[in-house]
Amino acid sequence: MTIFIQVVLPVILVFCAGYILQRFIRLEIKSISTVVLYILLPCLVFDTFYHAEFNQEYLMMVIFSIALLFIILFINKAAAKAAGHPTSTESGLILSTAFMNAGNYGAPIVLFAFGEEGFVYSVSFMVIQQIVMNFFGVYYAAKGAAGVRLAITTVLKMPPTYAVVIALTAKLANIPVSENIMSSITLVGDATIPTVMILLGMQLANITVKQLDWGKISYAASLRLVGSPLIAWGLTIILPMSDLMASVLIISAAMPSAATTTMYAVQFDSKPELVSSITLITTLLSVVTIPIVLNIL
């Protein structure tokens, strides 16, 4: 209960604020998300990567992300084949289980639970996940060659991708950034997490669920909230990394389905109702599962 009150409850309250706001005042979410994507998040990413001390752990983080993704993809494909699901259902389940909400939800949880040192790992993992989700998420939503082209285009359009490149270039080339400019970047970047927390609450308020397929929802929720952190735990044992980084990656892997996948499902008609319902249910259930994972860690 202490972990829930000190770590999870403050995050949930911010989500609720966004949810209530959107229920009573129907705001344009796309405009807010555009500000986050094109201004706030790039500043946070630049600040994080420019000051980060890169070592073998960051390579392990990339390997961890790819391994976790492909293991979950394998499980979904095997389950879909066994159940005889059509391609659209398989894609919908992949969208719901392979991509976690490491940014809007995971980053603030890590910040409250593990402090600034853990938060640096969380932001780095969030960037990696965003690139992976933009590519593979779009690919599985679009299902085909057009999906590959669109996925590559989407990744190249993401401002945080360029923020990483610029930050690494400046860091490796020893290009100094003046204190005043860095202060401005840090100031804007610090607004990212509270804004995306409110944004997630607003996104949840816009999710409409007409008919719940409890069989598929139970499978997806179990894989996302229980299976994913167990797989992550196994990977952190195999891959050499610090205890703090392992804890951050495990709790990040325990996050509910990413809200972004709902937009992909709607755009490419990959079972949007199923993906939306799984996103909503896993987010609600995470209020119980995340404190349990934190307590174990």
Image (spheres, helix red, strand yellow):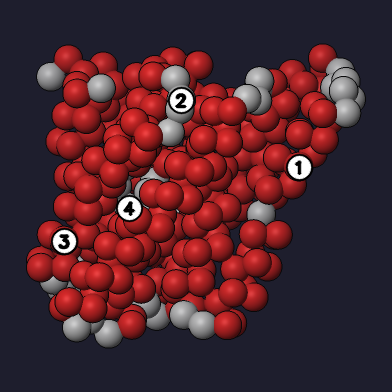
Q: CA distance from mark 4 to mark 2?
A: 25 Å
Q: CA distance from mark 3 to mark 2?
A: 31 Å
Q: Amino acid at mark 4?
A: Ser
- Badge 4 vs badge 2, beta-carbon distance below 8 Å: no
Q: CA distance from mark 3 to mark 1?
A: 38 Å
- Badge 3 vs badge 4, beta-carbon distance below 8 Å: no
Disc 4: CA contacts within 10 A as few (<14), some (14-19) or many (>=20): many
Question: Considering the numbered disc 4 on the image, is that residue within a helix, a strand or a loop?
Answer: loop
Q: CA distance from mark 3 to mark 4?
A: 13 Å
Question: Considering the numbered disc 3 on the image, is that residue within a helix, a strand or a loop?
Answer: helix
Residue matched to label 3: 219
Q: CA distance from mark 4 to mark 1?
A: 28 Å
Question: Considering the numbered disc 2 on the image, is that residue within a helix, a strand or a loop?
Answer: loop
Quadrant housing the N terminus: top left
Image mark for residue 241 = 2
Residue occupying image coordinates x 55% and y 77%: 147
